[in-house]
Image: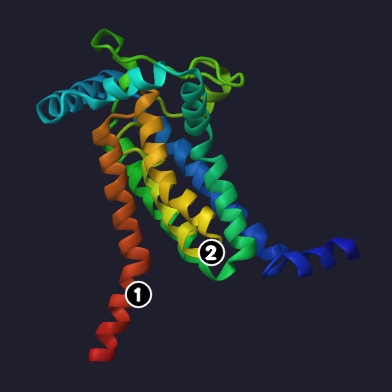
């Protein structure tokens, strides 16, 4: 026990109690996500109607760029596998590891990073409840396909995915929102230039992957970017604006 306490003092910025508090916050959010999922997937016809509405808007804007991206992904097995890996891991695995790394190595940036992720995801949950939307892969008659296949035992029909995921959580794309937040924060706190470039490119790659695998429309991705921008502005910008107002006063 003493060795465990000593390890916590040595490696954890604020000890085991604070780490437990952060984990409780994160798993509490996951519980809220499941509650929102139960509300959002009760009306599949509405989700398909909203999906068709998104398709109609995009047809007038850019002739469904997602179909072009899907053909690009289909043309290379390596690209298809990389896009599939990105889709399955960019949301929880990469976000979780990024939060953990910042918590341990750049702790001064952790609280705002965490709050931005949580706020963006709360906005996303509200969107899923108010605007359930079927993703492109659910419209095969229009040329869309689920290119993920069976990647590492994961597919949209597997029991684990059906249990934990919301099938109509397309609008807004939290893959897009979280990737933008993670990319910008890690770009700002990492010191290696190569790593900085990687994280700067990361959001665009995730956006490409979620559209190329048939899981989000371009409009979903755009909405996710807007959600991330609002969350960043509130968490990072509002305190600065408030301090300037107080200084002026």
The residue pinned by badge 1 equals: 239
Quadrant location of the C terminus? bottom left
Alpha carbon distance from label 1 to label 2? 16 Å
Placement of 108 over or under 76, stated as above or below: below
Q: Quadrant of residue 13?
A: bottom right
- The mark found on residue 101 in the picture is none
Please indicate whether residue 58 sits to the left or right of residue 197 in the image: left
Q: At 26% from the left edge and 33% from the top edge, which residue is drawn? A: 218
Can see residue 127? yes
Asked whether, in this view, residue 86 is left or right of residue 7, the answer is left
Instruction: Look at the image and tell me whether residue 215 can be seen.
Output: no
- Is the residue 108 above or below the residue 202 in the image? below
Residue 111 in picture, x, y percent from top left: 51, 65
Q: Nearer the viewer, residue 124 or 97?
A: 97
Is the C-beta separation of discs 1 and 2 under 8 Å?
A: no
Is 199 located above or below residue 185 in the figure?
above
Q: Residues within 10 Å of mark 2 (few under 14, many from 20)?
A: some
Work out which residue is located at the far front of the displayed protein and give it.
194
Residue annotated with mark 2: 110
User: Outermost residue, left direction?
Assistant: 60
Report helix, strand or loop for mark 1.
Answer: helix
Is residue 44 or residue 7 the one in the foreground?
A: 7
Q: Earlier in the sequence, mark 1 or mark 2?
A: 2
Mark 1 surroundings: few (<14), some (14-19) or many (≥20) residues within 10 A: few
Q: Position of residue 238 (x, y in %)?
A: 31, 71
Q: Secondary structure at mark 2?
A: helix
- Residue 190 located left or right of residue 169: right
211 or 229: nearer the eye? 211
Residue at position x 65%, y 64% in the image = 18
Q: Work out which quarter of the rendered image holds the N terminus and state it.
A: bottom right
Instruction: Name which residue lies at 26% across and 20% down.
Output: 48
């Amino acid at each position: 026990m003493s060795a465990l306490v000593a390890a916590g003092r040595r490696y954890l910025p604020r000890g085991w109690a604070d780490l437990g508090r952060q984990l409780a916050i994160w798993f509490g959010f996951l519980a809220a996500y499941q509650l929102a999922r139960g509300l959002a997937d009760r009306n599949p016809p509405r989700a398909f109607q909203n999906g068709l509405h998104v398709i109609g808007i995009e047809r007038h804007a850019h002739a469904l760029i997602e179909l072009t991206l899907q053909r690009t992904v289909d043309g290379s097995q390596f690209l298809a596998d990389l896009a599939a890996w990105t889709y399955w891991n960019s949301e929880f695995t990469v976000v979780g590891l990024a939060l953990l790394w910042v918590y341990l190595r750049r702790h001064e940036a952790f609280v705002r990073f965490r709050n931005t992720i949580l706020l963006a995801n709360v906005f996303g949950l509200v969107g899923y409840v108010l605007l359930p939307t079927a993703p492109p892969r659910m419209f095969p008659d229009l040329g869309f396909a689920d290119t993920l296949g069976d990647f590492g035992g994961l597919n949209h029909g597997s029991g684990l995915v059906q249990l934990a995921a919301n099938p109509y959580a397309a609008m807004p794309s939290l893959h897009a929102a979280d990737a933008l937040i993670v990319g910008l924060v890690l770009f700002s706190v990492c010191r290696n230039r190569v790593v900085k470039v990687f994280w700067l490119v990361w959001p665009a790659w995730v956006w490409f992957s979620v559209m190329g695998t048939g899981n989000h429309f371009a409009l979903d991705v755009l909405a996710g970017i807007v959600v991330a921008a609002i969350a960043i502005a509130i968490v990072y910008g509002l305190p600065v604006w408030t301090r300037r107002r107080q200084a002026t006063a």
